[in-house]
Image (cartoon, rainbow, N blue to C red):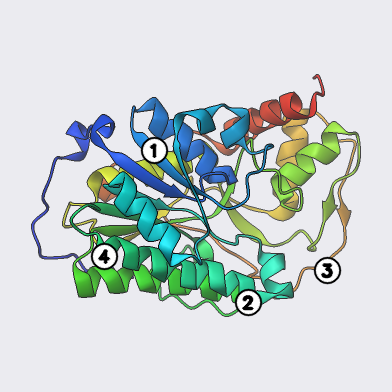
């Protein structure tokens, strides 16, 4: 979406006076890596949280932290419109965070249909449930990705860039953004879109991802394995900064400069895959274990980076974690999880 600002006047309280204790918050993807951290943050703000759970993973940070005992649970999936509508209506959700998605690029390449079903169909069904219950739902935050922009040499991505995903996962995120924009433009929905790069931090148990996979390998005194040739450039953001970004958007979504808009969130520190592995090794003092480079990654965007200027200017948002600090906190979490002392 572009920088065009909605001409309607914002309604409701300002972000500075926002009281989460008054909110009934529906979170999709709550048992996932980022969703678990978001739920914990919302509970700390005294919000009443409702979560959508399809398959309960007892290794999820939502369970391990005990947060699951403090939320209302709706069992179902994004493809089940009845479950989405029931969750919003029964629990009278006033705020919706849409994080659920099939988020693995490799899985989307191997079998795109489940990715399209979850990421595209799941999104329009959730937005439709919010539209039907617009008397209840006052704000919707959609978690997207830098993958929505697709491949371009004109970096860093800015919100004025077109959404041009080409490969299955990237296309699913482009569609997610366009669907959210459509519901704002057509039905005046109070929706905003968050686009982050690679989110990392404790609780991500998908070992095929570069950060958790590298940390686990080094903790086990094994050489990390790179699927790519190590030259792909990516934008990394610590999970707590991403969660803060989502919450900041929700608190400001009635602002005319925010409604219907997409926002990039980044610490604007762009590194290659090899460099992120080296940074992790430095934090862990494990530089004697160089990576094994396979060079097998295909159909992936070569270079990605985000400008967070709009988020700084409009929302006053900025990350609290440098790459080094975020990696240090992630390593600490994985040491505890895997039971490997420093």
Res 119 seen here:
yes
Label 1: how many residues lie within 10 Å, few (<14), some (14-19) or many (20+)? many
User: Going by the picture, which residue comes out furthest to the top?
Assistant: 341
Label 2: how many residues lie within 10 Å, few (<14), some (14-19) or many (20+)? few
Q: Please state if 8 lies on the left or on the right of 334 as rendered.
A: left
What separation in Å lies between label 2 and label 1 (alpha carbons)?
30 Å
* Residue drawn at the location 77% of the way across and 68% of the way down: 297
Q: Secondary structure at mark 4?
A: helix
Q: Secondary structure at mark 3?
A: loop
Of the residues under marks 3 and 4, which one precedes in the sequence?
A: 4
What separation in Å lies between label 3 and label 4 (alpha carbons)?
43 Å
Which mark identifies residue 49?
1
Of the residues under marks 4 and 2, which one precedes in the sequence?
A: 2
Q: Is residue 56 above or below residue 110?
A: above
What separation in Å lies between label 4 and label 1 (alpha carbons)?
20 Å
Residue matched to label 3: 296
Which mark identifies residue 113?
2
Q: Secondary structure at mark 2?
A: helix
Foreground residue among 37 and 315? 37
* Residue drawn at the location 34% of the way across and 43% of the way down: 25
């Amino acid at each position: 979406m572009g920088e065009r600002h909605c001409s309607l006047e914002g309604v409701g309280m300002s972000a500075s006076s926002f009281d989460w204790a008054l909110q009934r918050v529906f979170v999709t993807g709550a048992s996932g890596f980022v969703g678990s951290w978001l739920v914990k943050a919302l509970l700390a703000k005294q919000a009443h949280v409702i979560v959508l759970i399809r398959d309960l993973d007892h290794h999820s940070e939502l369970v391990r932290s005990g947060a699951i005992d403090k939320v209302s649970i709706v069992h179902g999936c994004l493809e089940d419109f009845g479950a989405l509508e029931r969750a919003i209506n029964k629990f009278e959700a006033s705020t919706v965070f849409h994080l659920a998605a099939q988020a693995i690029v490799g899985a989307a390449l191997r079998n795109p249909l489940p990715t399209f079903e979850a990421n595209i169909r799941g999104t329009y069904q959730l937005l439709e449930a919010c539209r039907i219950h617009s008397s209840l739902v006052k704000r919707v935050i959609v978690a997207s990705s830098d993958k929505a922009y697709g491949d371009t040499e004109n970096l860093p991505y800015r919100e004025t860039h077109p959404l041009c995903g080409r490969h299955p996962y990237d296309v699913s995120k482009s569609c997610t953004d366009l669907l959210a924009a459509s519901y704002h433009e057509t039905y005046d929905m109070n929706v905003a879109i968050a686009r982050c790069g690679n989110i990392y931090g404790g609780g991500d148990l998908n070992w095929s991802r570069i950060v958790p996979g590298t940390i686990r390998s080094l903790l086990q005194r094994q050489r990390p394995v790179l699927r790519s040739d190590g030259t792909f450039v990516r934008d990394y953001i610590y999970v707590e900064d991403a969660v803060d970004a989502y919450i900041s958007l929700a608190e400001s979504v009635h602002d005319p400069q925010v409604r219907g808009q997409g926002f990039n969130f980044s610490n604007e520190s762009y590194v290659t895959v090899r460099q992120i592995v080296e940074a992790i090794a430095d934090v862990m003092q494990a530089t004697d274990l160089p990576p094994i480079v396979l060079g097998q990654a295909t159909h992936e965007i070569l270079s990605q980076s985000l400008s967070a200027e709009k988020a700084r200017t409009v929302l006053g948002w900025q990350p609290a974690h440098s790459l080094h600090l975020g990696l240090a906190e992630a390593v600490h979490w994985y040491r505890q999880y895997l039971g490997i002392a420093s």
